[in-house]
Image: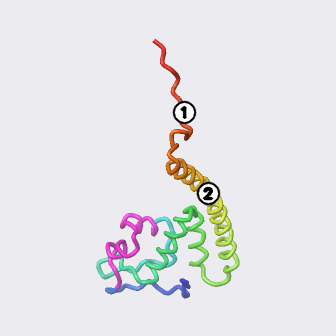
Amino acid sequence: MLEVKPPVAPERAETGLTIAEAARRTGVSVHALRYYERAGLVVSPVGRNHAGRRRYRRLDLEWITVCTRLRATGMPIRTIRRYAELVSAGYGNEQDRLALLEAHRAEVLAKLAELQENLQLIDHKIDVYRGRLAAGDADRLWAPRRPAETD
Protein backbone atom coordinates (compact mmCIF):
# COMPACT_ATOMS: atom_id res chain seq x y z
CA MET A 1 0.00 0.00 0.00
CA LEU A 2 1.36 3.37 -0.99
CA GLU A 3 1.63 5.75 1.91
CA VAL A 4 2.74 9.25 1.13
CA LYS A 5 5.21 10.81 3.53
CA PRO A 6 4.98 14.49 4.48
CA PRO A 7 5.95 16.66 1.50
CA VAL A 8 9.55 17.70 1.17
CA ALA A 9 11.15 20.29 -1.06
CA PRO A 10 11.50 19.06 -4.63
CA GLU A 11 14.90 17.55 -5.15
CA ARG A 12 17.20 18.55 -7.92
CA ALA A 13 18.65 15.14 -8.47
CA GLU A 14 20.75 13.50 -11.07
CA THR A 15 19.29 10.18 -9.96
CA GLY A 16 15.91 8.80 -10.82
CA LEU A 17 14.36 7.80 -14.11
CA THR A 18 13.93 9.86 -17.24
CA ILE A 19 10.41 10.46 -18.48
CA ALA A 20 10.92 7.78 -21.16
CA GLU A 21 12.09 5.26 -18.55
CA ALA A 22 9.17 6.17 -16.27
CA ALA A 23 6.78 5.72 -19.19
CA ARG A 24 8.17 2.24 -19.89
CA ARG A 25 8.02 1.20 -16.23
CA THR A 26 4.48 2.42 -15.66
CA GLY A 27 3.00 1.55 -19.05
CA VAL A 28 1.87 5.18 -19.40
CA SER A 29 2.88 7.27 -22.39
CA VAL A 30 5.27 10.21 -22.07
CA HIS A 31 2.39 12.43 -23.14
CA ALA A 32 0.18 11.03 -20.37
CA LEU A 33 2.90 11.59 -17.75
CA ARG A 34 3.16 15.24 -18.76
CA TYR A 35 -0.64 15.51 -18.72
CA TYR A 36 -0.79 14.06 -15.19
CA GLU A 37 1.48 16.89 -14.04
CA ARG A 38 -0.44 19.61 -15.88
CA ALA A 39 -3.80 18.27 -14.68
CA GLY A 40 -2.74 18.31 -11.04
CA LEU A 41 -2.82 14.55 -10.60
CA VAL A 42 0.61 14.18 -9.02
CA VAL A 43 1.02 14.54 -5.27
CA SER A 44 4.48 16.05 -5.22
CA PRO A 45 6.51 17.91 -7.81
CA VAL A 46 8.49 15.62 -10.07
CA GLY A 47 12.19 16.22 -9.54
CA ARG A 48 14.37 17.84 -12.18
CA ASN A 49 18.02 17.44 -13.00
CA HIS A 50 20.48 20.29 -13.56
CA ALA A 51 19.21 20.67 -17.14
CA GLY A 52 15.58 20.90 -15.98
CA ARG A 53 14.62 17.46 -17.26
CA ARG A 54 12.19 15.39 -15.25
CA ARG A 55 13.57 12.69 -12.99
CA TYR A 56 11.02 10.25 -11.59
CA ARG A 57 11.49 8.61 -8.20
CA ARG A 58 9.96 5.36 -6.98
CA LEU A 59 7.28 7.32 -5.12
CA ASP A 60 6.34 9.11 -8.36
CA LEU A 61 5.99 5.79 -10.18
CA GLU A 62 3.89 4.32 -7.38
CA TRP A 63 1.57 7.32 -7.43
CA ILE A 64 1.23 7.14 -11.22
CA THR A 65 0.23 3.49 -10.80
CA VAL A 66 -2.43 4.51 -8.28
CA CYS A 67 -3.77 7.11 -10.71
CA THR A 68 -3.85 4.73 -13.67
CA ARG A 69 -5.64 2.06 -11.65
CA LEU A 70 -8.20 4.52 -10.35
CA ARG A 71 -8.74 5.72 -13.92
CA ALA A 72 -8.98 2.13 -15.21
CA THR A 73 -11.80 1.53 -12.74
CA GLY A 74 -13.71 4.49 -14.11
CA MET A 75 -12.80 7.21 -11.65
CA PRO A 76 -13.17 10.57 -13.40
CA ILE A 77 -10.07 12.77 -13.75
CA ARG A 78 -11.67 15.45 -11.56
CA THR A 79 -12.09 12.91 -8.75
CA ILE A 80 -8.51 11.67 -9.10
CA ARG A 81 -7.43 15.31 -8.98
CA ARG A 82 -9.46 15.83 -5.80
CA TYR A 83 -7.89 12.73 -4.26
CA ALA A 84 -4.41 13.97 -5.22
CA GLU A 85 -5.19 17.36 -3.67
CA LEU A 86 -6.26 15.70 -0.44
CA VAL A 87 -3.14 13.53 -0.33
CA SER A 88 -0.91 16.51 -1.15
CA ALA A 89 -2.50 18.56 1.62
CA GLY A 90 -1.15 16.08 4.14
CA TYR A 91 -2.56 15.02 7.47
CA GLY A 92 -5.99 15.89 8.76
CA ASN A 93 -8.19 14.95 5.80
CA GLU A 94 -7.98 11.17 5.98
CA GLN A 95 -11.74 10.90 6.53
CA ASP A 96 -12.33 12.77 3.26
CA ARG A 97 -9.93 10.48 1.42
CA LEU A 98 -11.63 7.44 2.89
CA ALA A 99 -15.08 8.72 1.88
CA LEU A 100 -13.87 9.40 -1.67
CA LEU A 101 -12.41 5.90 -2.00
CA GLU A 102 -15.42 4.20 -0.43
CA ALA A 103 -17.77 6.01 -2.82
CA HIS A 104 -15.65 4.94 -5.78
CA ARG A 105 -15.50 1.37 -4.47
CA ALA A 106 -19.30 1.27 -4.33
CA GLU A 107 -19.44 2.43 -7.97
CA VAL A 108 -16.90 -0.21 -9.01
CA LEU A 109 -18.87 -2.93 -7.20
CA ALA A 110 -22.06 -1.84 -8.98
CA LYS A 111 -20.27 -2.03 -12.34
CA LEU A 112 -18.88 -5.45 -11.46
CA ALA A 113 -22.36 -6.68 -10.57
CA GLU A 114 -23.69 -5.41 -13.90
CA LEU A 115 -20.81 -7.05 -15.75
CA GLN A 116 -21.42 -10.31 -13.88
CA GLU A 117 -25.07 -10.24 -14.91
CA ASN A 118 -24.08 -9.62 -18.53
CA LEU A 119 -21.52 -12.42 -18.34
CA GLN A 120 -24.25 -14.81 -17.15
CA LEU A 121 -26.25 -14.03 -20.29
CA ILE A 122 -23.19 -14.65 -22.47
CA ASP A 123 -22.51 -17.95 -20.66
CA HIS A 124 -26.14 -19.00 -21.22
CA LYS A 125 -25.91 -18.23 -24.93
CA ILE A 126 -22.64 -20.19 -25.17
CA ASP A 127 -24.27 -23.16 -23.45
CA VAL A 128 -27.21 -23.03 -25.88
CA TYR A 129 -24.90 -22.95 -28.91
CA ARG A 130 -22.72 -25.78 -27.57
CA GLY A 131 -25.78 -27.86 -26.80
CA ARG A 132 -27.33 -27.35 -30.22
CA LEU A 133 -24.07 -28.00 -32.02
CA ALA A 134 -23.48 -31.19 -30.00
CA ALA A 135 -27.05 -32.36 -30.70
CA GLY A 136 -26.62 -31.65 -34.39
CA ASP A 137 -29.59 -29.31 -34.57
CA ALA A 138 -27.87 -25.94 -34.68
CA ASP A 139 -30.21 -25.05 -37.55
CA ARG A 140 -32.93 -24.71 -34.91
CA LEU A 141 -31.13 -21.71 -33.43
CA TRP A 142 -33.10 -18.55 -33.96
CA ALA A 143 -31.98 -16.32 -36.79
CA PRO A 144 -33.88 -13.45 -38.28
CA ARG A 145 -35.43 -14.35 -41.57
CA ARG A 146 -35.12 -12.03 -44.46
CA PRO A 147 -38.38 -11.03 -46.02
CA ALA A 148 -39.01 -12.76 -49.33
CA GLU A 149 -37.92 -10.57 -52.15
CA THR A 150 -40.58 -9.61 -54.61
CA ASP A 151 -39.94 -8.37 -58.08
Q: Which x, y percent locates residue 75?
A: 58, 64
Residue sitting nearer the eye, 126 or 74: 126
Q: Is mark 1 on a helix, strand or loop?
A: loop
**Magenta span main SS:** helix
Q: Which residue is drawn at 49% across and 65% down?
A: 39
The numbered mark at residue 144 is 1
Residue sitting nearer the eye, 116 or 85: 116
* Residue farthest to the top, as pictured: 151
Quadrant location of residue 73?
bottom right
Check residue 17 for magenta coloring. yes
Q: Which x, y percent locates residue 57?
A: 41, 83
- Magenta-tinted stretch: 16-37
Q: Residue at x 50, y 87 (%)?
A: 8
The numbered mark at residue 120 is 2
Residue sitting nearer the eye, 63 or 35: 63
Quadrant location of residue 17?
bottom left
